[in-house]
Image (tube, rainbow, N blue to C red):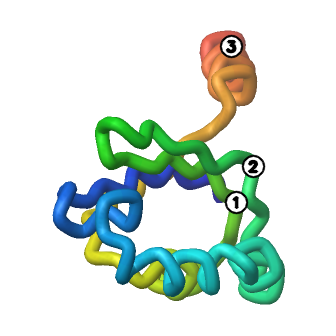
Amino acid sequence: MLFHVTATHLPEHCPLYNPEMQAGMADAGKNIEATATELGIKIHFSVTGAPDHVIFHLVETESLESLRRWLALVPIKQDFRITPVESTIAASTSIGQDAARR
């Protein structure tokens, strides 16, 4: 399944503004892709909107537990919104097939 993850944090939990958090973030970042692979997660993209203290991920996994474990690797306090999504092409095709059956 595909999941769109929105991760947000407050400025006081942001490693860009808190030098004492930077080493932990750097360590977590070194293994983030390898750990995702170990957990059965394919990262399609991971981007940041740094001024807004938000990170967006599109990941593919069959295990919500694996996704939770992967997200917990980042050593800062964050809130997550995890939304199951599908390709708009796949959704459109499915809708067209359903309509043809009627």
Please name the residue shown 35% across and 77% down the image.
76
Q: Indicate the amino acid at tag 2.
A: His
Q: Dots 3 and 2: beta carbons under 8 Å?
A: no
> Residue 95, percent across and down?
61, 19
Which residue is painted at 52% across and 77% down in the image?
25
To which residue does mark 2 refer?
44
Mark 1–mark 2 CB contact (< 8 Å):
yes
Q: Earlier in the sequence, mark 3 or mark 2?
A: 2
Against 46, is 1 above or below? below
Q: Secondary structure at mark 2?
A: strand
Query: Quarter-wise, where is residue 81 in the image?
Result: bottom left
Q: Secondary structure at mark 1?
A: strand
Report whether 9 appears left or right of 19.
Answer: left
Which residue is labeled 3 in the image? 96
| Quadrant housing residue 39 | bottom right
State which quarter of the image contains the C terminus.
top right
Question: Toward which corner of the image does residue 41 lie, by quadrant?
Answer: bottom right
The circle on residue 60 is 1
